[in-house]
Amino acid sequence: MSTSSVKKAQPDAVKPGANPQQTRGLVIIGAVVAVALVALVAVIALGGASSGAIDYTDIPSSRTSDGGFVLGFPEAPVTLVEFADFACPHCQAYHPTMQQFIREFVVTGKAKFEYRLMPTTGREVSLFTGKLLECAEELSPGSFWRGKDLMYTYATSGRYNADIGRQFAQDIGVSYSDMLECSANAQQVTIDANLANTLSVQGTPAVMVRYDDSSTPVFVTVGTTTYDRGGAPFTALASMVNAANPS
């Protein structure tokens, strides 16, 4: 077929003499579509803003008596404890829920968040990365929480393996050789795994709660439901926090 025989498709246009009511209908439809597109763009923008990286700079952080990493204001009446493994697909899927918890309850001073490293799916790799996180905090105080989020980023982008250490050191801004030297004696991930065993945590993710800093964590219970398998839904966590923060 010659190129001269191919006609380009043209957009439909209102023909001269068209019905005025039909024309007005097309204009109204166009306006509705335009408004809907603007609304969609706004929703996407707001969603992106709410799901962006958390700035941990102004959120206090501390350690428990056995070294567990805690985020939040000291006076918060309740602490959510998560046991997780970066390599665990269910933990990766649950991570946004934990980020939402931090934004809504930790940043506002209603709760603290305690993160415990529990190698399950990742096994030796997660043991290694847990040691790197502990050492990142020792070498550059405040690095643990940003480092935790980086590990989830590596895991969900196919980079979570035994070779991630050098990239992690570069992203955190510490010496990789110093981090490796420190990791030889790092014990927090082992302490966390032993605590999980003591508390009968069967897998990851698992969430528990402390109602004061010295208490033993217990599984989250809301009403007659105890969430002892997998992560509790955000609505249950919100109910638990709100009950601990009477208005």
Image (tube, grey):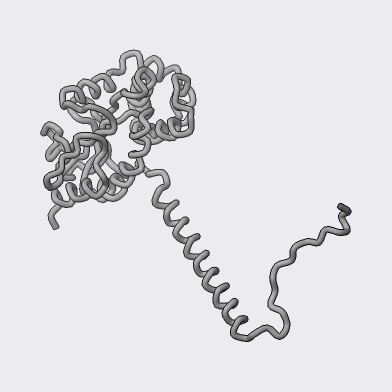
Depth order, front residue of 198/3 = 3
Up the image or down, 194 lies above or below 220; here it is above
Left of 17 or right of it: where is 124?
left
Q: Residue at x 26, y 47 (%)?
A: 234
Depth order, front residue of 93/208 = 93
Give how far across and how far down residue 220 sits, in percent: 17, 40
Disc count in the image?
0
Give how far across and how far down residue 24 sits, in percent: 59, 82
Which residue extends farthest front? 1
Up the image or down, 60 lies above or below 242; here it is above
Up the image or down, 53 lies above or below 17; here it is above
Q: Residue at x 23, y 31 (%)?
A: 63
Up the image or down, 215 lies above or below 4; here it is above
Q: Residue at x 29, y 27 (%)?
A: 117
Depth order, front residue of 6/167 = 6
Q: Residue at x 24, y 24 (%)?
A: 192
Q: Quadrant of residue 226?
A: top left
Give how far across and how far down residue 20 sits, in percent: 63, 86
Q: Quadrant of residue 116?
A: top left
Q: Quadrant of the C terminus?
A: bottom left
